[in-house]
Image (spheres, rainbow, N blue to C red):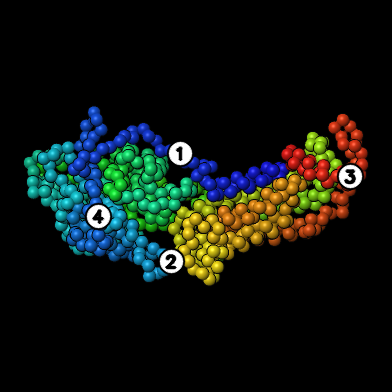
Amino acid sequence: MDQKNLIVAIVLSVLIIVGWQAAFPPAKPPVNGSQQQTTSPSGAPQAPAGQPAAPGAPPVAGAPPQVVSRKDALERSPRVTFDTPELVGSIALKGARIDDVNLVKYRVTIDPKSPPVPVLSPVGSAHPYYAEFGWSTGDAAIKVPGPDTLWTADNTTLAPGKPVKLTWDNGEGLVFGLTIGIDDFFMFDVKQSVENKTDKPVTLYPWSLVVRYGEPPAEGIYILHEGPYGVFNGGLKEFSYSDFKDNKQQKFSTTGGWVGITDKYWMATLVPDQKTKVDVNIKSTGAGADLKYQIDYVAPAMTVAPGAMGTAGDSHLFAGAKIVRVIDAYETKLGIEKFDLTIDWGWFWFFTKPLFWLLEWLYVQLGNFGLSILILTVIVKAVFFPLANKSYAAMSKMKALQPEMEKLKERYGEDRQRMNQELMQLYRREKVNPAAGCLPILVQIPVFFALYKVLYTTIEMRHQPFFGWIKDLSAPDPLTILTGFGLFPWHVPEILHFFNIGIWPLIMGVTMYLQQKLNPQPTDPVQARVFQFLPILFTFMLAPFAAGLVIYWAWSNILSIAQQYTIMRRHGVQIGGKAKPAVAAAVPAPAAGPGGAGGGSAGSGSSSSGKKGGKGAAKKS
C-alpha cells in the first residue's frame, strides 16, 4: 500500500470516529402509516378527514399549567411515596400518575452534594415527564378515569414486595383498580382490573402511555441515539424528535418488545405483556411551549361480564438508569424481547458488548476504571501481538530501504512507470510487503471505535475517577491550555472549545508523533508534511473526547512504540533511519531501454528530478 493510500486510510478513520453521522447516516424510520394529527381546542384528538376516531385511543395530554417549583407541583396532589435502594419519589393519586422518580445513586454533577438525577417530573414543574395507565371505551356514556380523577390508595407507601392498590368507583357500577408494584431497581409492575357491578357487559381498552413535555437537550450525534425508540415484532426502530415535527405520528402493531423515550443514560420505557398483540402509537402534539411527545400502546379490548372482575395483562414501566447488568437481568427474568437494545451498542454490538464485559470485569478486580482501560489495552495488544509483530517487522524493513527508495526516486524521477517497476522489484528482492504497515492502523480503528462506544454510551463509566486530576473518565480532560491547566478556572466560551486542549490530549499527540518517527517516512515532501500534521490534527480532534478514551489512545501508542522500537533494533534498523549495510547496494544499475533513464551509479540523479518523481513513486506501490 502506498503512502497516499495510507493517508486516505487515516483520514477516513478520523471521519469514522468524529464524523460518524456524515459517513454512516442511520436509516430513516419507515413512513408507512404516518399521518398528521390535529388537536381540537379542548385537547381531544381528532381523526384525520375521512377516518373514524379509534374507540380505544388513549387521551392526549393538554397544555401544562403555569410552571412552579417541583416542590409546589408535587403538593398539588396527595401521593403514595416510595424509597428503594435505587429510586426515591412518589405517585400522584390525582390521575394515578407515576410522575416523581429520582435516582438515589446518580447525581447531576460529580459533587456528591449535587441534586439526584430526576427521571420523571410532575405536571406543573419545568419539564413534565410522566407515565399513566388507564382505560378507554367506544361508549361515551361509560365514565372512565381521567387525568383529574382522584384515586384512593390502600397504603401511603410503596416498597419492593409491598404493592399498592389504587381504586376508583365511577358511581355507575364500575370499580377500576391499579395495583402498582416496584422492585429493588427501576421497574414498576402495573396490573389493571375492572369490577363490573352493573347488569350489562362492558367493553374496555387498557392502555399505557408516557408523556414528555418539550424537546430535551441532546448530544446530537449519530453514535448515540436519544429520543423515542422501541422493538416491534423483533426489530429495533429509532426515531429522532424531529421525525414528529408538525404533530406527525408513527403507528405499529406488535407482539412482544417494548417502546420508550431515552436520554443518554436514563430512559422511561413501557413494556407490554409479551404474549399480547398491542397497537403502539408515537406522536407529538402542540407546539412551542405546549409541545409534547407521547408514546402509548393499547391492549386488545376486554369485555367484563356483569358481576365479574376483568384483568388486563401485566404492564411494566422502566424508569431509571440504563445499567447493563440490570437491563440484561430484566430481559431474562421478564422475558422482554431484545431489551438489551435499550442500550445503544451500535452496529458493531458483537464487538462492543464483549469489550464492555471485559472492561467491567477488570473494574471489579481492580476497583478503578482507568486502570481497567490500561489493562484492557495490554490485553488487546497481546491478542494482536503476532499480527502486529509481522506488521512492525515489515515497517522496519521499509524504513531500512528508504535510502534506496530515495535513490530510485532520483534516478527515475520523470519515468513513473519504470520507477514503480524498480520499486516493486526492490520489495520482492527484500521480501517486503508494503501493505503490512497499514495493519496496525486497521486493527486499531475497530478497537478504538468500540471502546469509544463503550465509554460514550454506557453509564458505568459516568463520574468514574482516574488518578490525579481526572475525576470523570466520561468527560473531557478538565486541565486545559485555555484555563492555564487549572490555574485559571473560568468558563471557556463554546466558540473556543476546539482550542481548549487538555493535558492527556497533549500526551496523546506527543506519543503519536514519536510513533510516527519510527515509521517509514513518505518520499514525497507533500505527503511527509501531511503526516507531520496528523498528530496535531488528532490532538485537536480528540481534545473534547472522554478522558478515558484519550488515555487509552495514549497508552496504546506507548505500548506500540515499545514494541516497534524492539523490533527495529532486532532488525538492525537505526532509530535515526540509517539502513542496514547489507541493503546499501541493493539497487542494481539500470539497463538502457525505451523506458529507461540512462546508465549511472545507484546514487546518480538530481534532487530536483527526485522531487518531481516522488509523487509518481507513491502511486502504484
Choose the circle earlier in sequence order: 2 or 3: 2
The residues tagged by marks 3 and 4 sit, at their Cα atoms, a distance apart of 84 Å
- Tell me the quarter of the image containing the C terminus: top right
Location of the N terminus by quadrant is top right
Please determine whether, in this image, residue 193 is positioned above or below residue 591: below
Identify the residue under disc 1.
27
Work out whether 475 lies above or below 397: below
Residue on which the image places disc 3: 604
Crowd tier of the residue under label 2, counting other residues whose Cα lies within 10 Å: few below 14, some 14–19, many 20 or above:
some
Cα distance, mark 2 to mark 4? 28 Å
Whole-percent x and y of residue 220?
44, 49
Sequence order check, earlier mark of 3 and 4:
4
Q: Nearer the viewer, mark 2 or mark 3?
A: 3
- The CA span between labels 4 and 1 is 34 Å
Q: CA distance from mark 3 to mark 1?
A: 58 Å
Query: Which of labels 3 and 4 is toward the front?
Result: 3
Kindly give the residue lying farthest to the right in the view shown.
Answer: 600
Q: Secondary structure at mark 3?
A: loop
The image position of residue 439, as x and y in percent, is 67, 48
| Label 1: which secondary element | loop
Indicate which disc, 4 or 1, sits on the residue closer to the N terminus. Answer: 1
Instruction: Inspect the image, locate mark 1, and give the three-letter code of the amino acid beneath it.
Output: Ala
Q: Residues within 10 Å of mark 3 (few under 14, many from 20)?
A: some
State whether residue 177 appears in this view: no
Q: Which residue is mark 4?
A: 123
Q: Which residue is mark 2?
A: 110
Looking at the rendered structure, the kind of residue marked 3 is Ser
